[in-house]
Image (cartoon, helix red, strand yellow):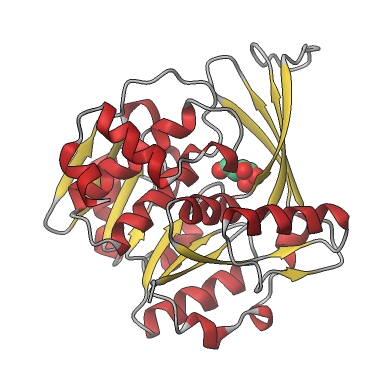
Amino acid sequence: MKEKVAVFGKVNVDTLLYIDQLRMGENHLCQQTIVDIGGKGANTAIGLAKLGVDCHLMACVGNDSISQSVLKKLEKYGVDTSFIKPCAAQTGKTFVVVESNGRNTMFHILGANSCLTPEMINWTFLEKCTAIFIQFGVPVETVREIILMSKRNGKYLYIDPAGFADESILELVAYADTVAPNEVELFKMTKETDIEKAAKKLLSAGVEEVVVKLGSKGASLFSEKFSYHADAYNVDVVDTTGAGDAFNAAYIAGKIKKLSLRDNLRLAVAASAISVTRQGTSSSSPTREELIDFLQKFGEKELFEVL
Ligand code: RIB
């Protein structure tokens, strides 16, 4: 039987606006706009499903036709949506401005994501899952309950602190098997300015592995006994939106396959490299076949053979 992964997090409708360069207070011409399913929860769940992982998304959406089409699309990707609850608020929305160098600036409306309470969670089902992904951006009491339940039941717990990283979440992040911030989030959580020092602070708080997403510089991993840096792949960057979520999905998929820490980090960096070459958020993450092709192209023989 396939191992099950529960994903808790935001589901959004993303509207992406592609422009040359963002200048506050000025008018801009958009070269293109795209509407895509977004939210770290949905993006990570879709990324996992594309890699063939049995993935169950636990989230809240609105109760209208837009929400219905979001659910249908998630199901089309192979994500189990049976634990997603409808609520009176509208499905979350994010407006993303993407500049020609791929950099993004986001504007969020939390909407239904704020409705996910602990009472809505199917705790019995959660006991059957091997791994749990959680982000912040859903109510913090819910995040706390899920984290504590995961630890009590010996689940693999992956936390992405994106967007909500500050010192106040350190106490919760400390329970993670893997915490995966970017550089800014790492520094905000730890009040440090050096990556290694900051990662060590998280390790001494109780985290098992700290994975720092460094964008065009790749990613670094720190654990008690091991540290490793994976360089980024040399690709043409079109849109960085969702790259961190493609990274999350590949890292969790690699954990399930029991890849070594080194291989797992390279795999996640490869998935995010594919994502940045494409427009969109959830639609830009790779399938298992695309990841294998990419690794073959870059001569990562050992990696594609284990996939
Ligand atoms: O990580 C990218 C995501 O962050 C977008 O899809 C957007 O919805 C925001 O939650």
Residue 233's spot in the image, x, y percent? Answer: 31, 26
- The residue positioned 38% from the left and 84% from the top of the image is 153
> From the viewer's perspective, is residue 27 above or below residue 12?
above
Quarter of the image for the N terminus: give it.
bottom left
- The residue positioned 33% from the left and 80% from the top of the image is 154
Residue 151's spot in the image, x, y percent? Answer: 38, 79
Quadrant containing ligand 1: top right
Q: Which residue is outermost to the left?
A: 225
> From the viewer's perspective, is residue 69 above or below residue 208?
above
Q: Is residue 240 left or right of residue 249?
A: right
Q: Which residue is outermost to the bottom?
A: 124
Q: Is residue 141 left or right of residue 52?
A: right
Residue 185's spot in the image, x, y percent? Answer: 45, 44
Residue 183 in view of the camera: no
- The residue positioned 51% from the left and 75% from the top of the image is 146
Residue 54's spot in the image, x, y percent? Answer: 47, 66
Residue 224 in view of the camera: yes
Q: How many marks?
A: 0
| Res 282 → quadrant | top right
- The residue positioned 23% from the left and 36% from the top of the image is 230
| Res 247 → quadrant | top left
